[in-house]
């Protein structure tokens, strides 16, 4: 089932189409097939980068897609693997960008095992995916860095814990715990946001590089 935010599909409604496009690009360099991949992955990737690097997200995404296009013939895997691979490339480009700006890169989280996921975590994830893009990103960017990235990769990019862990260079248990904690915090923030939304002008979305 596709996840959506603001009416846009974050995960393809037709997974077979993306898999077929992957084969066509690898085997024939099909430009139309590459456009299918771009349309399937770019919306979520751009949201992820917006929280990492703010207004520089488009530039960083462009650099990431140049890297993806260059190395796509070497990629081996399915649609989920491609999303994870693309997210890894985009994250590396974002961290390079932050280092270039003399910013501190995202910190690693403590590796902990997730023992129990309460029902309100699912409620928070459903609410975030149904919210307006800017409102959702503003909420997520209030989280600690490790939690924000875990939520972005899982709820926005549609990666499972194992794929997200590979992107972040962590264990799946650590990613589950970070996402779990982030969604618990969001479950508390969402009602507060809804109460204060009427007539209040939202500030520009902060970025992870501004969040401590």
Image (spheres, helix red, strand yellow):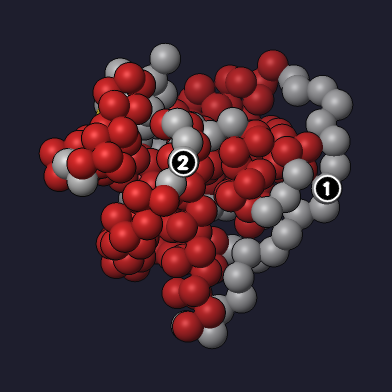
Q: Is residue 109 above or below residue 182?
A: below
- Residue at (32% x, 66% y) in the render: 63
Q: Which residue is labeled 1 in the image?
A: 111
Q: Position of residue 137 (x, y in %)?
A: 44, 46
The disc, 1 or 2, on the residue closer to the chain's N-terminal end is: 2
Q: Taking 190 as reference, is 144 left or right?
A: right
- Is residue 47 at least partly visible in the picture? no
Q: Position of residue 165 (x, y in %)?
A: 66, 44
Q: Is residue 204 above or below residue 200?
A: below
Q: Position of residue 104 (x, y in %)?
A: 61, 75
Q: Residues within 10 Å of mark 1 (few under 14, many from 20)?
A: some
Q: Which residue is labeled 2 in the image?
A: 76
Q: Residues within 10 Å of mark 2 (few under 14, many from 20)?
A: few
- Is residue 33 at least partly visible in the picture? yes
Count the marks: 2
- Residue at (33% x, 19% y) in the render: 16
């Amino acid at each position: 089932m596709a996840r959506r935010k603001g009416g846009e599909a974050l995960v393809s409604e037709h997974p077979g189409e993306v898999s077929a496009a992957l084969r066509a690009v690898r085997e024939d360099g099909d430009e139309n097939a590459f456009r299918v991949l771009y349309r399937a992955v770019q919306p979520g990737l751009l949201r992820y980068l917006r929280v990492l690097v703010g207004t520089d997200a488009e530039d960083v995404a462009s650099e990431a897609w140049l890297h993806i296009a260059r190395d796509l013939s070497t990629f081996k895997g399915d649609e989920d693997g491609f999303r994870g691979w693309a997210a890894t490339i985009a994250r590396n480009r974002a961290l390079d960008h932050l280092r270039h700006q003399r910013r501190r890169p995202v910190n690693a989280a403590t590796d902990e095992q997730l023992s129990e996921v309460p029902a309100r975590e699912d409620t928070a994830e459903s609410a975030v995916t149904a919210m307006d893009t800017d409102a959702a990103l503003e909420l997520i960017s209030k989280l600690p860095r490790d939690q924000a990235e875990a939520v972005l990769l899982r709820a926005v990019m549609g990666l499972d814990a194992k794929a997200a862990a590979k992107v972040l260079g962590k264990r799946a248990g650590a990613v589950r715990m970070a996402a779990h904690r982030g969604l618990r915090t969001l479950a508390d923030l969402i009602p507060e946001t809804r109460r204060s939304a009427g007539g209040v002008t939202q500030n520009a979305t902060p970025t992870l590089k501004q969040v401590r």
